[in-house]
Image (cartoon, rainbow, N blue to C red):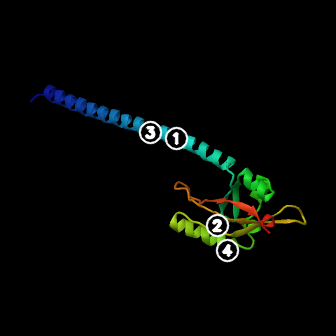
Amino acid sequence: MDGSDELERSEAAQRQASDELHQRVEERAADLRSVDESLQREAAQRQRSEERFRNIFEYSNDAILVLDPDHDEILDANPRACRLLSCTREELGNLTLGALFPEDLARLQSFALAVVEDGFGWMDEISCQTLVSVASVNEVEVVRSTSAKPANSTRPLYTVACAIRSMAAVA
């Protein structure tokens, strides 16, 4: 065997290895394009879903609060909640849960923990209050609550949908 035969075999092996590598790169690129297209479809679906839920949140006849009981925060409120509690979103966002649920904060936090464990929950008759003016306190009652923890969140959020009615109107 002379050097030229060995060189030809070496070059052939190199071409074959290069062709195999090129083929693997093309297959991987096709897989990545497919994954990218799938992610883009999922992102578009998520955006449409978020828009639908945002519309439900904004236009619901129920008062809806987005709460973080672990950090004693009100993260968001829909317009109905703002009207019923006589606060702007900003004012509600500046309140602590302890200020809104002073008598039932421990119950609310226990409920939130149960929701984290069970994945869902229901709680009736929790009282909350907000200052309408310096001298006036408006008592309200939460008659329906539901909660969820986002699967992709590192920080648990508890969405509490509250059908709130003024206790003053009931009395």
Of marks 1 and 4, which one's residue comes earlier in the chain? 1
- Asked which quadrant contains residue 97, the reply is bottom right
Of marks 2 and 3, which one's residue comes earlier in the chain? 3
Q: Check disc 4 and give the amino acid type.
A: Ala
Q: Secondary structure at mark 3?
A: helix
- Asked which quadrant contains residue 145, the reply is bottom right
Label 4 sits on residue:
106
Of marks 1 and 2, which one's residue comes earlier in the chain? 1
Label 3 sits on residue:
38
- Mark 1 vs mark 2: give the one in front: 1
Residue 159 placement (x, y as % from top left): 62, 58
Foreground pick, 33 / 38: 38
- Mark 1 vs mark 3: give the one in front: 1
Q: Which label number is shown at residue 70?
A: 2
**Cα distance, mark 1 to mark 2?**
30 Å
Identify the image quadrant of the N terminus. top left
**Cα distance, mark 3 to mark 4?**
44 Å
Q: Check disc 3 and give the amino acid type.
A: Ser
Label 1 sits on residue:
45
Foreground pick, 57 / 22: 57
Q: Please identify the residue farthest to the right as the structure is shown.
A: 135
Q: Secondary structure at mark 1?
A: helix
Q: Please identify the residue farthest to the left as the structure is shown.
A: 1
